Amino acid sequence: MASSEGFLTEEQREMLKIASQNAEVMSSLSLASSPKSPGPKSPGQHFSVLSEHHHVKAPGGGQSAAMGGVAVRHVRRTHSGKQIRVKKDGAGGKGTWGKLLDTDGESVIDRNDPNYDSGEEPYELVGSTISDPLDEYKKAVVSLIEEYFSTGDVDVAASDLKELGSSEYHPYFIKRLVSIAMDRNNKEKEMASVLLSALYADVISAAQISRGFFMLLESADDLTVDILDAVDVLSLFIARAVVDDILPPAFITRARKMLPEASKGFQVLQTAEKSYLSAPHHAELVERRWGGSTHLTVDEVKKKITDLLREYVESEDTSEACRCIRQLGVSFFHHEVVKRALVLAMEIQTAQPVIIKLLKEAADEGLISSSQMVKGFTRLAESLDDLALDIPSAKKMFQSLVPQAISGGWLDASYLKSSDKDGEKPDKNDEKLISYKKEVVTIIHEYFHSDDIPELIRSLEDLGMPEYNPIFLKKLITLAMDRKNREKEMASVLLSALHIEIFSTEDIVNGFVMLLESAEDTALDILDASNELAFFLARAVIDDVLAPLNLEEIANVLPPNCSGSETVRLARTLTAARHAGERILRCWGGGTGWAVEDAKDKIQKLLEEYESGGVVSEACQCIRDLDMPFFNHEVVKKALVMAMEKKNDRMLELMQECFGEGLITINQMTKGFNRIKDGLDDLALDIPNAKEKFKFYVDHAREHGWFLPSFGSLVDPTAATSS
């Protein structure tokens, strides 16, 4: 129980101290000066303010003023002169009036009394548990992590963590995520690393990630008690975080200084640095240690779907089958579940009732969406002719299944309308578009084989259909997404070149809008379509093909509830992350690794080095090492400007060599000259004879065949000088 002093203010405590001192002084004075007291009296005959009731009165007049401003409570005396000690609160004692407002009977509060006051009710202290926000946060994130390991949905996990709030506790989330994954299989370890990379910068700050990993290092000794290889696994997590650019390499040095050398955490840092980060090709080794990407290929998913459906037919356990479908984590690919389930029902007619039960249950639970169900039926309808070769009654069975599914409520009636539209013949006006699509598919395949950008541009110009440029972009990226990283990189490089040569920003915006509007259809064959499209968008921003504001423009054009909106949001996140340029340029294992400004700086330096006495062959090799053929017009532009400034024509030798080797194409050469022509007026402010020099360079280029005849008018020196 708290003492009475705990309820006094500082002023009252000071008054209490003074009262104690005064009481002791008065007591000693009365003992020494009283004529009726020849000898010392026992302490029990006098009562100080502290020993009596611990009661302090406010300073006032009368006797209290005469006694140092504090009224001392005295013993009461009867008329006979006898001393009577008063009981606490003045109650009882012979010759006293009793306690204030004391009555003979026991006081009872009557709630029906008109004068009843609820404040007179006795207080009841009710015990309650004080919740710790950190404990609540830890419980919530465990549930979040388990759900993520079950579904593999990064976006949902990120959204749930945002909604949870308490961002100051995010280091505990990192500690809990990694510690749980350490005790699981390689799949969960890989998933944990993927999630951390996705949350970096957008949800969890760099400082919080560093703090979370340091907390793991501090608890490494405890982790080794339950996880035998904790040191090796945790060191791999740290190495992976460094490779993924979510932990700076300096983290290891800083953390080592803060940990005891005998600790397991110190040992973890040594293992991460020496065994993983110092090894040759360490980035690839670390990324593949747990089996690489968590994404499954289309063939792998199809096989898993077939296996789980066959197991379901044998066990007839609907809840287990739904759990397996959910665990696949490919909600955008559920149409394949529908299609394969219906095919299995046709192959094994006795299994038809249980298949229908599964599909109905999955639809009722919301596991398979209405749109995915319709797509599954549509895809099966498209392949009925081929299916009828193996199952003669396939069409008849399918026609009986459709009304049964609609009446059962697990197939939307809109399927009938869409199937009617599919039977319509194409309009004659579309013949031109159909022909164009066939042509560009051939052109794109040839480009993937030859890597010849100028040839592709000439082919597009020969087609003479610039109004279909957005459709070409859609075809290009769709075909690239279904290929390897090499083709994806080539598609991005081509997009940059097309933007410079013949595509407007509007063409590119419209092309990406078309891609995003049909993202769900693209996902029918490409599982990771949404993430791939986000990287193409982000890469376009990094390559200056699109401006960041164009992403907002694209998002505003998309229809409501379009899945492409989430793709645009992911692209924004990618471009806003730390070191975004370098990471996105290398997202497919290719790329130059240079941002545009870095590339310009490299070009400037290599030209300066050549001009100061370098060798032509070395300069050509440096241009080749840049690996940016679509950006060689910048080499031409900077070389011409430098030739004007230095007042010598040495750069023309370099350009002739580059043209002769095919290093700089006619298109890029012409583009460079056009860039100079466009800025000639501004250039003349610093170089007075710029126009005369430019005319000389144009004549020289014509003589050596650097331009095609059709480009002559574009770089007419007369027009340049007259302007």
Image (cartoon, rainbow, N blue to C red):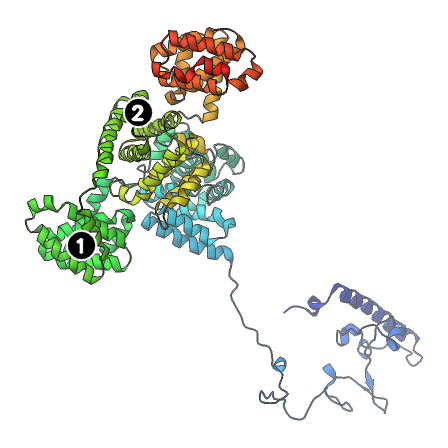
Quarter-of-image position of residue 34: bottom right
Binning the other alpha carbons within 10 Å of mark 2 as few (below 14), some (14 to 19) or many (20 upward) gives few
Mark number displayed over residue 694: none
Q: Position of residue 470 (x, y in %)?
A: 33, 35
Residue at 51% over, 8% down: 612
Q: Is label 2 in a helix, a strand or a loop?
A: helix
Q: Nearer the viewer, residue 647 or 196?
A: 647
Is residue 114 visible from the viewing direction of this image? yes
Tell me the quadrant of the picture where the N terminus can be found.
bottom right
Residue at 47% over, 57% down: 136
- In the rendered image, the residue lying farthest to the left is 392
Q: Where 13 falls versus 114 (above or below)?
A: above
Marks 2/1 in contact by CB < 8 Å: the verdict is no
Q: Nearer the viewer, residue 648 or 53?
A: 648
Q: Along the polypeptide, which appears first: circle 2 or circle 1?
A: 1
Q: Position of residue 23 (x, y in %)?
A: 83, 71
Quarter-of-image position of residue 30: bottom right
Instruction: Write down the residue under mark 2.
Output: 461
Q: Is label 1 in a helix, a strand or a loop?
A: helix
Residue at 20% over, 39% down: 428
Instruction: Write down the residue under mark 1.
Output: 312
Is residue 87 visible from the viewing direction of this image? no
**Would residue 290 appear left or right of 432 to someone viewing this image?**
right
Residue at 45% over, 41% down: 200
| Identity, as a three-letter code, of the amino acid under mark 1 | Tyr
| Identity, as a three-letter code, of the amino acid under mark 2 | Glu
**Would residue 255 appear left or right of 701 to someone viewing this image?**
right
Q: Position of residue 251 (x, y in %)?
A: 50, 35
